[in-house]
Image: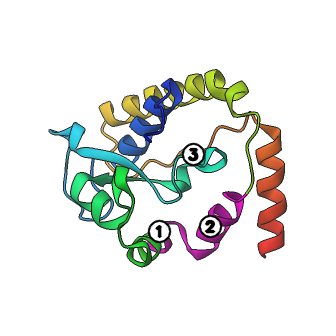
Amino acid sequence: MAVKRTVADKYFSKCIRLRTNWICEYCEMDFSHDIGSLHCSHFVSRNNKIVRFNPSNAFAHCYKCHEQLGGGRWGGGNIAEFANHYDAIHGADQRELIRTLSSYPYPRFKRHEKAMAKYYREIMHDMETMRNNGECGRIEFDMYEGCEEINELTEKLRNALH
């Protein structure tokens, strides 16, 4: 069953694709003239709410690369290849943090949805302004930090993994 797409998903997805200036992070093809063909691809499924809106869990992948690496909507893909790709961008330590964090529940997810949507909409507008002002490179952005439970757990796990 497909995961329901929220307003927060819409803005987060656009931030992920704007981060790379509409370029697939795997094949490096430019999709600025065909933005619908560039997906927001998650390393750990977006079914997993605790890492769903974490920028280091999401990538801009074209349809072909999304299918090859993560399987897109129907699962599958080459997880070893995706892990190597992940490590090249974010590092193995961050991948392990995301994997470990994903095993925890996020019971208060609904409570934060509107605030997350607002946060990622503002980030998206800032990124669009940067692009309109000529910024061409990768634009990093921070995860929504309004949920103290996730912040505390992330910090606790980060310290335990090091």
- Residue tagged 1: 86
Query: Mark 2 vs mark 1: which is more N-terminal?
Result: 1
**Mark seen at residue 47:** none
Identify whether 2 is placed above or below 73: above
Whether pointer 3 and pointer 1 mark residues with C-beta atoms closer than 8 Å, the reply is: no
- Residue tagged 2: 94
Mark 2: which secondary structure? Answer: helix
Q: CA distance from mark 2 to mark 3?
A: 15 Å
Report the magenta residues as a range: 87-103
Instruction: Give the overall secondary structure of the magenta segment.
Output: helix
Q: Residues within 10 Å of mark 1 (few under 14, many from 20)?
A: many
- Residue tagged 3: 52
Judged by depth in the image, the label closer to the viewer, 3 or 1, is: 3
Mark 3: which secondary structure? Answer: helix
- Using the image as rendered, state which of residue 20 and residue 116 is in the foreground: 116
Q: Amino acid at mark 1?
A: Tyr
Mark 1: which secondary structure? Answer: helix
